Image (cartoon, rainbow, N blue to C red):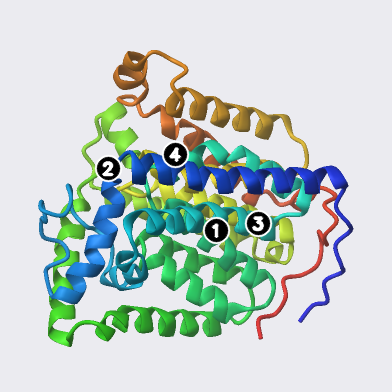
Amino acid sequence: MAVRPPPLPAPPAARRWLRALLALYLLTAAFVTVQQGVFARSNNFRIFRASAVNLVAGRDLYAPHPDQHFDRFKYSPTFAVLFLPLAVLPFVPALFIWSLLNALGLYYALRRLLPERRAALAIGLVYLELLLSVQYAQSNALVTALIVLAFVALERGAPGRAAALVAADGFIKLFPFAAAALGLLYPRRLRFTLRFAAAAAALALLPLLVTSPAELAAQYRSWRAIETADALNRGYSLMGYLHDRLRLEWPNWPVQLAGTAALLLPLALRRARCAEPGFRRLFLCSLLVYCVLFNHQSERATFIIAYTGIAVWYAGSAPNRLRTAVMALTLLVMAVHDVDVLPRWVKWQILVPYGIKGIPCLVAWPLMQWELLRGRRSESPGTGRSATAPAPAPT
């Protein structure tokens, strides 16, 4: 394994900012718990808790359960069994733990990914999206954190841990399975693939701890049926923009296939650059945006994933006017779309129908791909960490 030089000490100001942001993220989890647990009962969180109860009781997870919640459960049976600890606790403490897991998970992941000063910048930039995701009691901040931590594990020569994190993420929501592409950046790709397959198989069978094989097979059939029906959706994805703005009636899969090919193209054409830490991190940023831009189920609360990619791209790179402009656009969209700074009719009659939320992704992703495809060495600011060390060989 390559020897990584010790990081330079962080300036005191960076550490103060990190402590302040940690306090802010903790207070956010507490605030949302009061808002969505005491003064209301978050429907999304009720769905998650009910899924664990229904799995143990042998009920169809994907059928309507109007006596328990509105809408339907659409996650995997594995997610349901993993949610059991939060289903047995009282609602408010369980919601607080779930909010903490999402908020602090993302904080911790970005803290591990970037040096202190740049981590503080990225953590601050994504705060509004983190707040929105936690208010919805969604899993998207946790999904983002697991992708980032999988990348960090690969950077530190731990492919087994990375494979397990990607597999676990995919059993929360399907599209994070795309993060398996991170393994292509490193040596011994076959070893990573085998460990990923083993972890995915173990997680797929995990619900057998509380249900029978026949019942689990029935749950997977129901899950497949509901996912097949949802495959016709377009959400805030690129497919949605092509349909709504250009009136293109294409199915989703050709656009998703083209997007996947474009995502992986730099790895085929610029293979030698995988030795550059900046190139690897830039691919992570592109992957995070890709997970929203080509996800037919993307929604408002999903953008924490893509906006984290944009924030890391900005915070982890050398100063650049174009990146600064894209980051400014992203912050502007966050403010006008997620905060009531404009009259509500503007939001619901203009911003939401026209999909303003996704515009930063439509701008940022092609720029990231262009940077990946450029022949010259990727930009690396002086961060206190090695900017030129080769990727460590997994052990």
Does 115 appear above or below 304? below
Circle 2 sits on which residue? 234
**Which circle marks residue 132 in the picture?**
4
Kind of residue indicated by mark 4: Leu
Kind of residue indicated by mark 2: Arg
Q: Does 321 sit left or right of 43 as displayed?
A: right
**Which circle marks residue 281 in the picture?**
3
* Mark toward the start of the polypeptide (4 vs 3): 4
* Mark toward the start of the polypeptide (2 vs 4): 4
Q: CA distance from mark 4 to mark 1?
A: 15 Å
* Mark toward the start of the polypeptide (1 vs 3): 1
Question: How many C-alpha atoms fall within 10 Å of the one at disc 4: few (<14), some, or many (≥20)?
Answer: many
Of circles 1 and 2, the one toward us is 1
Q: Is residue 313 visible?
A: no
Does 311 appear above or below 82? above
Kind of residue indicated by mark 3: Arg
- x then y, percent, for residue 357: 42, 32
Q: Nearer the viewer, residue 203 or 236?
A: 203
Does 348 appear above or below 144? above
Q: Quadrant of the C terminus?
A: bottom right
User: Helix, strand, or loop for circle 1?
Assistant: helix
